[in-house]
Image (spheres, helix red, strand yellow):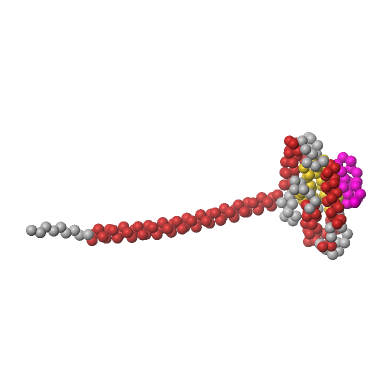
Amino acid sequence: MVVATLVDVSERRRLHELTRRAGVQLEKRVRERTAELEAALSSNESLLRDIEAQRMALEQLSREDPLTGLSNRRDFERRFAEEILRAERLATTLCAAMLDIDHFKSVNDRFGHTVGDNVLQQVASLIRGQIRAIDLLARYGGEEFALVMPATGPGEAQNLCERIRKAFHTFAWTTIHPELCKPITISVGLGAWRPGLSARCVLDEADRNLHIAKRGRDRLVQPGAQTQLQPG
């Protein structure tokens, strides 16, 4: 006697093939979605980098003079106030100077604003070349510059500013324009911080002394004494 069992596996094979195809499609969709997410993540990271770069650029613009690359007035006043607090905390000396280019309007009127801008850039470079890393220099407005000298007494500040003033006499201004035969000069007024004084008070003293210096041009007037120093 023979006993046989017949099983129809065609349905099982069909289901197995459907399952396999579904798995392949699912794997394909997973790969595609993963690629989309990676692309989106990369795009977002690039966008975030762009946003951060723009934020930093805007922050720099808010505190930097675009022509000279120096601190602008707003940034200078903020940092000067911080230096006052540091001087009070450490009981150190501090001086400030206001520096103004003599007869700058005549440079603009005679040679044009492009030459005037070049002069301003060179002035910034000359001053930077004489000061220390701890000093704070800013373009305060127009042709006027402001300088803070931490841990510096009036005598030291006078010597430093005299070096700046004399550097204007030795620079070859004809490299900017052939008709700039006479040296561009600056007038300087100094102010000295004392305990209890605000940054505004020190700058006001420096500004008063600058106005005295401007009466003769190419001069430096010290804090307190308000005497004029002859050009060296």
Residue furthest out toward the bottom: 178
* Residue 227 image-quadrant placement: top right
Please tell me whether residue 133 is drawn above or below residue 43 in the rendered image. above
Please give the name of the residue rendered at 62% of the width and 54% of the height, measured from the top-left corner: 53
Please tell me whether residue 44 is drawn above or below residue 153 in the rendered image. below
Give the magenta part as a residue range. 210-232
Spot occupied by residue 7 in the image (x, y as percentages of width and height): 18, 58
Residue furthest out toward the left: 1
Spot occupied by residue 203 in the image (x, y as percentages of width and height): 80, 43
* Residue 1 image-quadrant placement: bottom left
In the rendered structure, the answer to whether residue 15 lies left or right of residue 163 reads left
In the rendered structure, the answer to whether residue 25 lies left or right of residue 152 reads left
Please give the name of the residue rendered at 78% of the width and 44% of the height, measured from the top-left corner: 149
| Res 100 visible | no
Spot occupied by residue 19 in the image (x, y as percentages of width and height): 31, 57
Total labels: the figure holds 0
For the residue pair 37 and 169, the one nearer the viewer reads as 169
Please give the name of the residue rendered at 33% of the width and 60% of the height, measured from the top-left corner: 21
Please give the name of the residue rendered at 43% of the width and 59% of the height, measured from the top-left corner: 32
For the residue pair 89 and 97, the one nearer the viewer reads as 89
Answer whether residue 136 is magenta in the image.
no
Spot occupied by residue 225 in the image (x, y as percentages of width and height): 89, 41
